[in-house]
Amino acid sequence: MDDIIQVSRLTKKFNIRQNSSFIKSLFSPEGKTLTAVNNISFKIKKGERVAFIGPNGAGKSTTIKMLSSISYPTSGTALVNGLVPWENRKKLAYDIGTVFGQRSQLWYNLPVQDSFFLMGKIYNVDEIPFKRRLSKLVRLFEIRDLLVRPVRALSLGQRMRCEIVASLLHRPQVLFLDEPTIGLDVTAKEIIRGLIRRQALEEDTTLLLTSHDTDDMEKVCDRVIIINRGKLIFDDSITALRDSFLRKKYIEITTDSGQKIKMVVNTAITPAKKAVDELIRQYHVTDLTIENPPMEEIIKEIYARE
């Protein structure tokens, strides 16, 4: 497989003014330089599904914006499907799809299908192939009942399914997903993860997904790149990450009396299912949650090992 994304010594710095007065800052431009992305390099092969993760302010979204041609780097370079993003913005737009969890590309007051048809025109997709493509995606993402509803009337989970469909209408080679499950409930997250993975596998679409949710990376991706304070600190398979840093599970149950019981399980010693079965034998359980350790904890452990 060829490398569809190549990043070499990519750096992005921001000058931050510390003077609160704009007029004063013109004559006394005191400030500091913030390095959001610090000399990072990596390659992604066609069809790979890669999680690009880290805490708030790590540089994830800044990197995605450079690779999707929204932002220019301070130094370094990158190729996406053979194009330098910030030098080929219009041409690259036909090769990539983008989904930003907190920003919509759909028209707020229009029915969903109107946004889809507008985007088909924007990407110059011929009418018959477009209708076939839309029909397939509508069926896969189960949004037929949503097509005539205005975007403003959709739930967050419904809107996110429509956002992903919109990003796939022109058959992009690369799909950038920035926090696609943010704010969704557990059920909606599971649906979105399954749909993203299935779509990528069927069409050999390359995914670069950012998230704070470790379940996103485990259930969608095969490889993970971790960034912190602008620097890459981990690049390996999901299996390697799981074996080294995802051995804890946080289990919480609620009993019929309303009592909440929490426990931490080392899955290298005790399988999570065995721990849950033991709790169910001891208590009358009315609710149960199992969570991975938070991303910040994983990153701290990686730093400690380095």
Image (cartoon, helix red, strand yellow):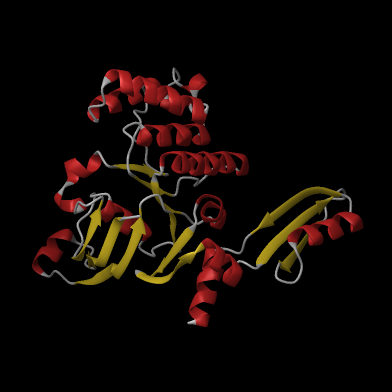
Residue under the point 44% across and 49% down:
179
- Classify residue 227 by image quadrant: bottom left
User: Is 53 located above or below residue 33 in the figure?
Assistant: above
Residue under the point 50% across and 36% down:
156
Quick one: 124 or 148, which is closer to the camera?
124
Identify the residue at the far right of this view.
Answer: 282
Residue 243 appears in view: yes
| Whole-percent x, y for residue 100 in the image | 38, 44
Residue under the point 37% across and 28% down:
108
Quick one: 261 or 174, which is closer to the camera?
174
Residue 111 appears in view: no
Identify the residue at the far front of this view.
Answer: 1
| Whole-percent x, y for residue 75 in the image | 18, 67
Q: Tag count in the figure? A: 0
- Is residue 295 left or right of 49 when viewed as pictured? right
Quick one: 253 or 270, which is closer to the camera?
270
User: Is 258 located above or below residue 188 in the figure?
Assistant: below
| Whole-percent x, y for residue 184 in the image | 54, 42
Residue under the point 55% across and 58% down:
214
- Is residue 143 left or right of 281 when viewed as pictured? left
- Is residue 234 left or right of 106 when viewed as pictured? right
